[in-house]
Every structure is written in structure tokens, then in C-alpha cells.
Amino acid sequence: MIETLPAMQTTRVRTVDFMQPLTDQPQPDAPAFGVKNLSMWYGAKEAIKNVTIDVPAKRVTAIIGPSGCGKSTFLRCLNRMHELVPRTRVEGEVLFAGQNLYSPDVDPAMIRRRIGMVFQKSNPFPTMSIAENVLVGLKLNGVRDRNLLNERLEKSLRMAALWSEVKDDLRKPGISLSGGQQQRLCIARAIAIEPEVLLMDEPASALDPIATMKIEELITELKANYTIVIVTHNMQQASRCSDFTAFFYMGALIEFANTAKIFSNPTRRQTEDYITGRFG
Amino acid sequence: MSGSANHQFRKAKSLIASLLCSVAALLVIAPLGLIFFYLLRSGLSSLNVAFFTNLPRPVGEPGGGMANAIVGSGELLALASLIGVPVGVLGGVYLAEYGTARVNALLRFVADVLNGVPSIIWGVVVYGLIVLPFKSFSAYAGSLALGFMMIPLIMRTTEEVLLLVPGGYREAALALGISRWKTIVHIVMKTASKGIVTGVLLALARIAGETAPLLFTAFGNRFWNRSLAEPIAALPLQIFTYAISPYDDWHRQAWAGALLLVAMIFLINLLVRFLTRGRAARVA
Amino acid sequence: MATAAVPTSVLQLRPASRFGDRAFEWLTFAMSLGVVVLVILVGWQLARGSHLAITKFGFHFLATSTWDPVAEQYGALPFIYGTVVSSLLALIIAVPLSIATAIYLTELAPLWIRQPLASGIEMLAAIPSVILGLWGIFVMIPWLRAHAFPALKAALGWTPFFTGPIYGVSMLAGGIIIAIMILPIITSVAREIMRSVPNLQREAAYALGATKWEVTRIAVLSYAKNGLFGAAILGLGRALGETMAVTMVIGNTPQIKASLFAPGYTLASVIANEFTEATTDMYLQALFEIGLVLFGITILANLLAQLLLKTMTRKMTTRVAQ
């Protein structure tokens, strides 16, 4: 997929370059995540190598890089989802709201309530209706108040730009929706518990162009309220909908900068090779 | 020329082998047809209202029915499920969701060994465990023997169907901050619920016809069972008793009971087929 | 946006209870240990119930053939003999039929026939032992007595195996009824094994110009040999423990006769018949010991089967990996 991109990519990048005035380095007031010297191992294999990065709050940060570069793994380190894989080990720290996610007294479940996640493959729960899917996070976390649930159902679906399409079918199974709608349902499900961050792991890679466009529009809207970190292998997508871009290669963070800068004037040779398609 | 003859010979050999295999298949399936035929011929004519509503008559007196045995079998199966279902299902959850490869390999192996234990042995074990200390055959003892037999069966099927639930659902639930046990109960087990029910039904169908483990636990009873601490009648036991008796009328009733038992077991299997068809459709 | 309308604090999300997680994991672990507890329970009960008999009779129990509860003489040899012979008879009948049927189902049968036939075999497996026994008593035994056994005697009466009076109930009848009971399990396991033989193997043989039967023999059977042996041993494990149907047709006479027309007795049958009549402690002890012997040999057979089937699957996966 990387090989097909280069020609288009460069022209597009140039236009972005002209249209947006840029600051060179991301300098948010208070970063959502302060990642310091983070390393992660699958067994003996080091998948993330000493990554230090400040992820800005209320912005969209894209993570790009070739397959197997550790971008998804890194994303999963931000809400400790990697722990589901046996024999993983993490060193370093991830500061979130002033606390290290990896300090021993932190409960991963509490972390994940504040840091939501959307996956590559849309995965609405097959036994649940649309409404149940949206509300499952609240219900299983102990919310009983009917009014609150109803309110949250509509609000989440509206924010996920799905309300007008499903408001008459809320009792239908979530898996009866189209692929793009399912993914937006998953986004609604994730934002129903009002997290502060949304981690998105290639959320549009399984969708057709129109559905992808809708997701990208949604991301742009959501960043007013959420810090968004999106992993993508699609560089156009990264340039279209992110404010900052981090380039990973072989588990290491090679470059992190304003998206326009990365795509127009990368500092590192490896970044330039990758975005111009000369990689590998 | 000799090459061609050789080829003819090889083709003939292949044809004969095919023929023999199909004859074998016919022989394997023949008992099923024969058993069905006789079950219907001898059983249907003996099924009447009295069979379902009356108690057995005293020895040698014609008439009467198996009402107590039918109800007794139901009670035994229900009680057995109380033991077999929770232990089997939760044990299967451990295998599918928590266990490490080594522990699982050991537990699976033990479960398979248990599945191979002859059913009469369960009767002997429960006799020593319950009947001897309490000095009485009882419904409790009978259902415990059946429940023990259900455990490894349900454990393995539960494990299998839970492993079929895609990991994405677990991830999605955990990413919502839902605790692991709630994820397992409300998401994973709910998604696999049809499969779990199927496993339970298959186990029930398997033990519904068991006689050997009941011989000296439930023991059988010519009357209604008034307390679960007393001996209780069961359909397979009654069929056995009547089959080896010298009375024609009892033989007739044994056939009727056998027909009923087989019908019940096939009904459960039909239900299973119906349930699994739904699941296959959903996965597709 | 209206985030402020429902501030997060209103939700009062309960802190996830780590206790719940731990409790649930321990609960399921305890339940899964149930199988281990059961195995220990079986061994312990059988050993406890029989230790007096074991210490009193020792090895004689297994090696002598007088079973006389009144005289307090307990020799289990006729039962061991009956169990082994009836099970072997069952295997001799069932294994070729099952494997041939499995071949038919996977290699030869027209597609439309495969599923119904496989379902029929599953149905046969679902028929309870006691019902097969009922059918055995009233349908099979009379037919054997009137037709099959006299024919056998006429044809093979010169061997020691088909001599003597024909009662119907007999070792051979027991073997046949067990064979019917284990046909489905052997067939379905054999079928699974043959289905797991990679198509590549078959295609390679076809490419050499082999006929259908040659393909089956070369590509499938030789490849699946260990697995099929495992399937047979699994059937043996079932056969050894079969109780009700055998008890109803084997004649229940503790004797060792060469003739297969003579009645016999099996370990499982003697437990089924005499357990509730065991009036003295030693009688009961002897029956528990029979249970222990039966448990031991079925476990051995099952272990062997598991081992064979496991090496089979391992061979499959490594070959596929290559």
C-alpha cells in the first residue's frame, strides 16, 4: 500500500504547505500524555524503543509508519490494552492527568474509562441493539439512571454523526448497520462514557472511501472535545485530519512535528523517504 | 497390452473397494433403521394415556404406566444440571479466558480422561460417597452421579464456544473500562450463550438415557418419590427392569418407555441442531 | 458542544472492583479444578472401597476364576476374560466397518449422501445403551439363535470358537452389541482424521495416475495410520466400560469357554447385576475392586488413544507448517 502513494502524496503535501501557516514544534500548554522513555517488549522482542513524546490535548495526533513499526503497539501502551497479550513488559512512564499510568496503584479499567479506543475492525457487540451498544459502557460501569442513559444515547449518537440515520432503529441489532455506520456506532459507544481521549487504531482502513470521509469529518469535529490519537497507514488521511504527526520506524519515534511540517519539510531523512514512498 | 490389462485390473480393484465401503456404510447405518423400526412397531401401540399418568401395577398385574419414572427422570436431570452446569460452564470459562497453556493442557487432559470413565463407575463412586454414609439410595445420589458425568462434557463444549468469540469483542469491552469479569459474563458469555446452551443440551441428551450410574444410586421406586433423600424411579431404570422381567405386559411397556426416551433425546438433538444453525448464520 | 450539560461527575462511575475480578477468576479456577477433584475422588473411593479385598486376596483376585460369594471366594478372571474377549470381538467387527464407512464418507460417497449418513451415525450414537439392550434381547438374540448362529456353526463348527449349545445370549452376542455401540465413535473420529489429511496428498497420488482406491490407500490410509489406530483404541476404551446393553445379552455366567456361543460375564456387568445384592462387606469390597480394575484398564486404553491421536495431530500441524 505504501508503494502506491508517492506521486499523489507529494503534490498534496505541497498544497497543504501553502495553505497553512505553521509552527515548527508542537508546544501544547498541557499535554494530554507525557510519554517518557517508554519501551515495551513482547517476550524478548523489543517492540517500542525508548519513546519520548508529549501528545497535545484537544488536538488530533496521527501516528504513521510502515507495517510492524510499532505504531499500534504504541497506541495500546497509552491505555494499557497491550496487557491483554501475555508476556509483555513495559519500562518508562506515561503521564496522564499528572499520574503515571504504569504506577502499581493504577487500575487499568479506570484508565480505560478516561481513554477510549476505537479499533480497526468495527466490533459492535453482536447480541446487542444499537442503543444497548452505545450504553453498554455506562450500564456495566454502574449507571442506572434512565434519564441520563437516554440523554447520553442521543448525545453520543449525534456526536458520532449517526443519530439521524438510526434514531428510528435504535432497537435493531448493532451488526445490522453498514460497515461505516458500525464504525461510527463504535465511536458513539466509546464517547458515551465521556472519555477525555480517543485512541483510534486505523479506524477507516476497512471502509470504503465515502465511509472513510465521514469518519475523517467526524474526527475533525470531535477534536473540539477530545484529544485524539489516530494510527493510520494512509498518509493522505494523516495529512487531511491531523494537527500533529509522529513517524515511527522499527519501534522508535523518528520524528514528531506539526503535520504540515512533516509532510512538506521533514527533518529526518527516514521520514522523507517514507512519505515520498522511497522506503523499503 | 499387458499394461492395459494391468490398468483394467486396477480399475476393477478400485471398484470392488468402493463397493465394499458402501456396503460397510450400509451395515453401520442398518442398526439405526432396525432399532427405529422395532421401537415404533412395539412402542407406539403401547403408548396410551395410562402410560403417562399411572403408577406401575404390582408384579404380574397388567396395565399401569411409568408416570413416576417420567417425572423422576425429569427431577434427576434437573438436579444433575444444578451440579453439572455451574461447575462445567465456569470451569470452561477458566479454560477459555484465564488458564495458561500448561494448566489448560493438564485440565483438558483430565477432562478427557473423565469422559472415558465407564458410566457404571460413577454409580460405584457415588454409592461409596453418598449411599453408604447415609444408608439409603436417593434421588440426591442418582443426580450426583449424573451431574459428575455432565461436568467434563459441559466444560469442554463451553471452552470451545467461548474460544470462538472473536477477541475484538473482549478488547472493545475492556477498552470501555469494563472490568474483566463483567466483560466475560456480559459480553463474551452472552455472545456465546447459544453455544453454551447447546453444550448443556448435548450433555443432558447424553446422560438422559444413562442407566448404569442409577442402578445403585437412584435405585428405582415403584411409587412416587416423596423426598429427594429416598429412592426415585427413572425412565431408563424402569426400561431395564421391565426388559429383563418375564412378563409380556412389562416388555410392552419397556418398548413404550424406550420410544419415549429416544423421542426425548432426539428432540433435544433437534433443538441443538436448530440452535447451531442460528449461530452458523450469525458468524457468516 | 454540550459536554457541560452532563458533567462526568454526575455519572459517579463506580471504581472498578478489583475484588470482583479476582473473585471471579478464583471461582472459575476452583470450578475447573473440579475435574481434577473428580479423578481423585474416583480413585480414592474405589481404592477405599476395595482395600480390604486387595489385602486379603492379593494377586489371586485377578488370577483365579472361582466367583462364589457364599464361600467367600472371589476370583475376577472370568470377568476380565469376558470384558477383554467381548471388547476384542467388538473391535474385530467394528473397526473394519467403521474405517470403511469413514472412507466412504470422506472419499467415495456422492456429496448429497454424506451429510444425511453422518447425521444418521450421530443418531445411532445418541441411542442409550439400555435401549440397544432391549432391542438386543427381543430382536437380535432371537434372530441370532434361529439364523445366524446355526449358520456359523455349520460353516465354522470345526473350530473351537463356534461349538456347543446355542442359547442366543452369548459372548458373541455381547461382542456384536458392543460393536454397534462403538461404531459411531470410531467412524466419526476416523472421519475427522481422514478429513484432516491435506488434499495435496491426494492430488499428488492422482497425478501419478492412481485409481480412487489407490489414492485412498496410499495418500489417506498410510498417512492416517496412527490416528486410525488411536480411533480404534478410543473405541476399545468405550467397549471395555459398556454396561447395560452387554449385561442384557451376554448371559451373565462367570466362566471361561473357548466357544463364543457360550454365555460370559464382564466386569461392568457383574457390578451392575450384583452390587445391590452384595450382602457381606467382603462381597461389596470385591465388587469395588472389580470397579477399580475396570477403571484402571479403561483409563489405560484412553490414555493410549489420547497419545496416538495427539501424535497424529502433531504430525499434521508440522507437515502443514512445512
Image: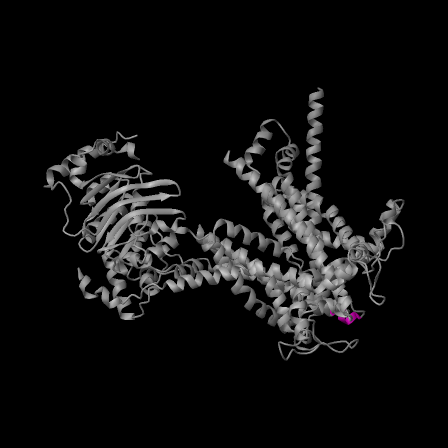
Q: Which residues are magenta?
A: B247-252
Image position of A28 with respect to B66: above or below: above
Task: Determine the residue located farthest toward the top in the rendered image.
Answer: B1
Return the x and y of residue A266 as percentages of the image width and height: 18, 35
Return the x and y of residue C219 as percentages of the image width and height: 61, 34
Report whether B103 appears left or right of C44.
left
Q: How is the image coloured?
A: one colour
Report whether C146 appears left or right of B34.
right
Q: Quadrant of residue B134?
A: bottom right
Report whether A157 appears left or right of C292.
left
User: What residue sits 24% from the left and 31% below the top?
Assistant: A273
Question: Magenta segment, principal secondary structure?
Answer: helix
Return the x and y of residue B118 as percentages of the image width and height: 67, 58
Kindly tell me whether residue A156 is visible in this rendering. Answer: yes
Kindly tell me whether residue A165 is visible in this rendering. Answer: no
Image position of B215 with respect to C263: above or below: below
> In the depicted view, which residue is nearer to us: A271 or A234?
A271
Q: Quadrant of residue A261?
A: top left
Image position of B187 with respect to A23: above or below: below
- Verify whether residue B248 appears in magenta: yes
Task: Determine the residue located farthest toward the bottom in the rendered image.
Answer: B226
User: What residue sits 40% from the left and 47% below the top?
Assistant: A87
